[in-house]
Image: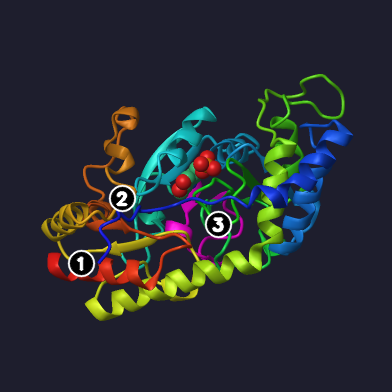
Amino acid sequence: VSTQSISVMRPRLPDPFRVVGRLNQIQSVRTYSNFGPQVRELESRYADFLGTSPDRVVSVTNATLALEGAIVVTDIGRWQVPSFTFAATPAAVLGAGRELIWADISADDWWIDVSTASDLENSGIIAVAPFGSGFSFNRWPRDREVIIDAAASLGAPLPPLSHLPPTWAVVFSLHATKVLPAGEGGLAVFGDASRAQAFRSWSNFGFDGRRESMRVGTNAKMSEMAAAFALCSLDGWDQERSEWQRAQEQARQVEHQLGLRTIPGAESQLSPYWIVEFQSVEQTDRVEHHLEANGIGTRRWWFPTCHTMSGFRHILAPDHLPVTEHVAPRVLGLPMFRELTEGHFSRVRLALSEAL
Ligand SMILES: Cc1ncc(COP(=O)(O)O)c(C=O)c1O
């Protein structure tokens, strides 16, 4: 048995030799940002990939800014946010200068449970797709303002985004740790083309055709170089998908053999995570320490929960977010990357069974 350590993740961008052609194109055009040819091609390719039109897809520096901009282009002052998420989600609401209301998650599938937040009527909903989950559009009323933080969901089964209600947006991350990576990058997809246009303007200093700020904006534009990497990832999607699928299938086998519980619906998804919910906090701690002692990386994803973090503690939370408080300390991310071999999974399975 190898004693080499196994990381919890090993991000991998497209091989540089596949990107060189696009980098040469960028150099010959000498446009490095500002919605150049690579970014335009990327938005159009993603419109096809996601089943919508290019005028509703805007590329952006990262998903955190995509969330912030998607909030800024609405008139909604208060947003319900689950505490069980990555810190980017609440940071985006506060970055947009809006009020944040913490909400609990549903025990069934870890999506936001909006009935738990205090202001049901006039608030927007930031629905976080847990760990790369897929989604449909029938969960919330079509006339609500909804932003789906689908940071890791580009590999999940999704309905055509042309069916997004006009007041909804979906945000994806192209960070190195996600599927289809660019290194840093994001996409904001809107149900309404005029919102997408307002978002594009916000991402470019509030300019709208002229070099004059028509609204308060920022600089959140994706560079041509990031778009070149993102396009090469898309070109290699078939290969990448089968590599993730193979690794995920092996993770499902280990779960099955050891009777572990993962995210509901994980069988049909293709995410860059292996998430397990253990039976008790004590068992989770034990697994974490035993795997570490055996050179196997784990990660506490979305724990501590956001509402308890120093950076967000000034935002009043309900006395209890019972499901969040139950789930978060029992969740552990186990190794998941494309080069994992059967040997790696055997080691993980052995260490898990010893700890359990
Ligand atoms: C749920 C969630 N939202 C937002 C983000 C932020 O994405 P980015 O790193 O592209 O800003 C992440 C990143 O991991 C995430 O997991």
Which stretch appears magenta? 121-147
Residue 160 seen in this snapshot: yes
Q: Ligand 1 closer than 8 Å to the CB at disc 1?
A: no
Q: Quadrant of the N terminus?
A: bottom left
Query: How far is the residue under mark 3 from the one under mark 1?
Result: 26 Å
- The disc placed on residue 169 is none
Q: Secondary structure at mark 1?
A: helix
From the viewer's perspective, is the residue at label 1 or at label 2 nearer? Answer: 1
Asked if residue 60 is among those painted magenta in the image, a careful observer would answer no
User: Where residue 331 appears, x then y in whole percent?
Assistant: 27, 57
Taking the spot 33% from the left edge, 50% from the top edge, the residue there is 301
Q: Nearer the viewer, residue 45 or 310?
A: 45
Q: Nearer the viewer, residue 187 or 101?
A: 187
Q: Secondary structure at mark 2?
A: loop
Taking the spot 52% from the left edge, 61% from the top edge, the residue there is 140
- The disc placed on residue 352 is 1
What residue sits right under mark 3 in the picture?
A: 179
Which numbered disc flags the more N-terminal residue, 1 or 2?
2
Indicate the amino acid at tag 1.
Leu
Looking at the image, the residue that sits furthest to the top is 212
Indicate the amino acid at tag 2.
Arg
Which numbered disc flags the more N-terminal residue, 3 or 2?
3
What residue sits right under mark 2 in the picture?
A: 299
Query: How far is the residue under mark 1 from the one under mark 2?
Result: 15 Å
User: Where residue 115 appears, x then y in whole percent?
Assistant: 37, 55
